Amino acid sequence: MSNDNEMKASTVHENEAGPSHEMAHSDLVQQKYIGCLLGGAVGDALGAPVEFMSAASIRHRFGPTGIQEFVPAFGKLGAITDDTQMTLFTAEGLLGGRFSKQKPTLPELRVYIAKAYQRWMHTQGYKHELQIGICNGWLMDQEELFSGRAPGNTCLSGLQGMRAASDIARNNSKGCGGVMRVAPIGMYFSSLNRHYESQHSQFLHDAFELGCQAAAVTHGHPTGQLSSGFFSAIIMELLSGKGLSEAVNWVLPLLRVRVSCEETLKAVETACRLATNRPNDPAALHLLGEGWVAEEALAIAVYCALSAKDFRSGVELSVNHSGDSDSTGSMTGQLLGAIFGQEAIPATWLEHLELATVISSIADDLTLNDWTTAEISASAIGLQPQGLTTLTETAALRAYAVTFRHWGPFRH
Ligand SMILES: [Mg+2]
């Protein structure tokens, strides 16, 4: 363990040094995108076996330092839960929307995401008339996703109660099932921001607003939605190059002007204050709640990520508490992965992570690095596989593959 930690410290040091040597800017961006989703997934998998255990029970079973390596959950080592599953479907909905329509509006993107959540519910074994004709595509071809991973009741009942894909939830839930799945929204708008930098404030607003709307598909309480908007927006800012404190400060003004922002605002401000005065302290973490509701999960993730000296210690802190360890692990891992990048994730966690290749691919696609080429190739070849014969450049072939994976008129 100590060797691993020493290795980690040097990795983190290199990452903090920035993109100076060898690594090109686009590679660094890709590292952070993949780090964000893989980081979330390893946090999810580390926390899954201890989700319903108290801090004392965790210490009793795993020793004073708590759980530090994967142990089996759902019958396998490295199993992800509904948090990562739904995150993948958020990404799939966004990419399907963007690759099907030149400039989808926020309400249109919410509908693409809502349909993607119906596909997720199908993988959990629940049928709905809105699933007819849309349960196909690249992500649905991943058989490992067809596995129940303690799906949240509010997510299931919200999706079961939908009468149209444009519906929003009619419950009063602020469970963390909304905020745990919206990181891809921040990734998506960070990508658009890289392509069109002059529109930063609009994209930040959009990341916040769509984060709220994506949560509203299943969660009706404003705190459940605003926490999600806040999380999406700070993910966007981290991937756009800001530090976490700076990102929080950029996003707080967007939160402060929203109706019913008080609970979310108080949770974030308390997390920031504790991270300054009592960093890396399980007793301080306990003051933020247990993470079952959205603003607590957000506060725990922000506190752990602000406190963390490296990826491993921050994620370990976030799962070794009495509460929703897989969700807080997932969100903390997403923040720290977006900060430190893929290479900061411990190899022993990545080695056994379920669906790691799928998660990396989706994260890479969300960079939209091949975006311009993808749009050109999509229109030029009419998305027919035989069109490949006319494409000789690697970039165009890659763009074709990304486009084909996410182009979705056949199911939207
Ligand atoms: Mg879960």
Image: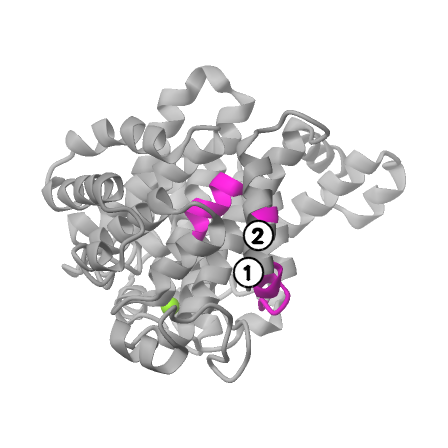
Give, as a three-letter code, the residue at label 2.
Glu
- Could you tell me if residue 363 is visible in this image? no
Sort mark 2 into few (<14), some (14-19) or many (20+) by Cα contacts within 10 Å: few
Count of numbered tags: 2
Q: Provide the secondary structure element on which disc 1 rests.
A: helix
Whether label 1 touches label 2, CB < 8 Å: yes
Is residue 5 or residue 310 the one in the foreground?
5
Classified by dominant secondary structure, the portion drawn in magenta counts as helix
Magenta stretch bounds: 333-354
Q: What residue appears at the point 78 percent right and 35 percent down from the top-left corner?
A: 395
Q: Would you say 385 lies left or right of 251 here?
A: right
Disc marking residue 6: 2
Q: What residue appears at the point 49 percent right and 18 percent down from the top-left corner?
A: 197
Is residue 29 or residue 110 the one in the foreground?
29
Give, as a three-letter code, the residue at label 1.
Ser
Q: Would you say 359 lies left or right of 314 here?
A: right
Q: Quadrant of residue 288?
A: bottom left
According to the picture, the residue beneath numbered tag 1 turns out to be: 2
Is residue 259 or residue 141 the one in the foreground?
259
